[in-house]
Image (cartoon, rainbow, N blue to C red):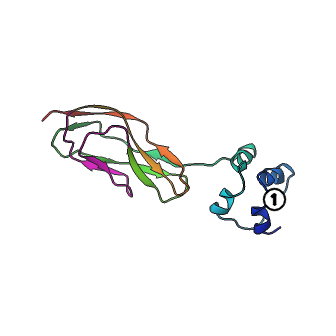
Amino acid sequence: MDNNDLKGSGPSFIGDLARMGGDVVGTMTQDQLKGSGPSFPADLARMGGGIVGPVVSGTPVTTATEDAAYDGFTVEATGGTAPYAYALVGDWPAGLAVNSSTGAVTGTPTEAGTFEDLSVSATDDDEEVGQLTPFTLVVAAA
């Protein structure tokens, strides 16, 4: 069976093939696999696999001073499908930003206060999302 037959074979064909002990031979791209039908992720899970998104790691700097350069930190995504797009999650103080390509969090906070449940997310090329464990940032008044 060629890949064109496999792509149009219905939502549970890949799971059925695995349950029967068959093999898929040849090459398929991620985009072709995504189009394998609505139950493809469930079939993959039944076969003991899964769609794995990025895992985000990094050590946030949890203190800063208003109107002073933030020491900053960089998060790193692994797993999933590169490239990754990084974004801030939560209500960050004005003046801080993340570089969407590198994961570097930098800037100068322009407001003091305690900012809870902050995080940085990474979205991979398959639109799977991972997130850094949430943390609290305390910005002291200048």
User: Which region of the structure is painted magenta?
Assistant: 89-112
> Could you say where residue 108 lies in the image, as x and y percent from the top left?
20, 46
Image quarter of residue 36 = bottom right
The stretch drawn in magenta includes residue 98: yes
Residue at position x 15%, y 33% from top?
Answer: 141
Q: Is residue 88 left or right of residue 32?
A: left
Q: Please state which amino acid type lies under the numbered disc 1.
A: Asp
Image quarter of residue 119 = top left
Single out the residue that lies furthest toward the left: 142
Report the quarter where the C terminus lies.
top left
What residue is disc 1 on?
23
The stretch drawn in magenta includes residue 12: no
Asked if 54 appears above or below 1 in the picture, the reply is above
Kindly state the secondary structure of the residue where label 1 is placed: loop
Residue at position x 72%, y 48% from top?
Answer: 39
Asked if 123 appears above or below 30 in the picture, the reply is above
Residue at position x 26%, y 39% from top?
Answer: 93
Q: Is residue 72 left or right of residue 35?
A: left
- Predominant SS along the magenta part: loop
> Could you say where residue 44 lies in the image, as x and y percent from the top left?
71, 48
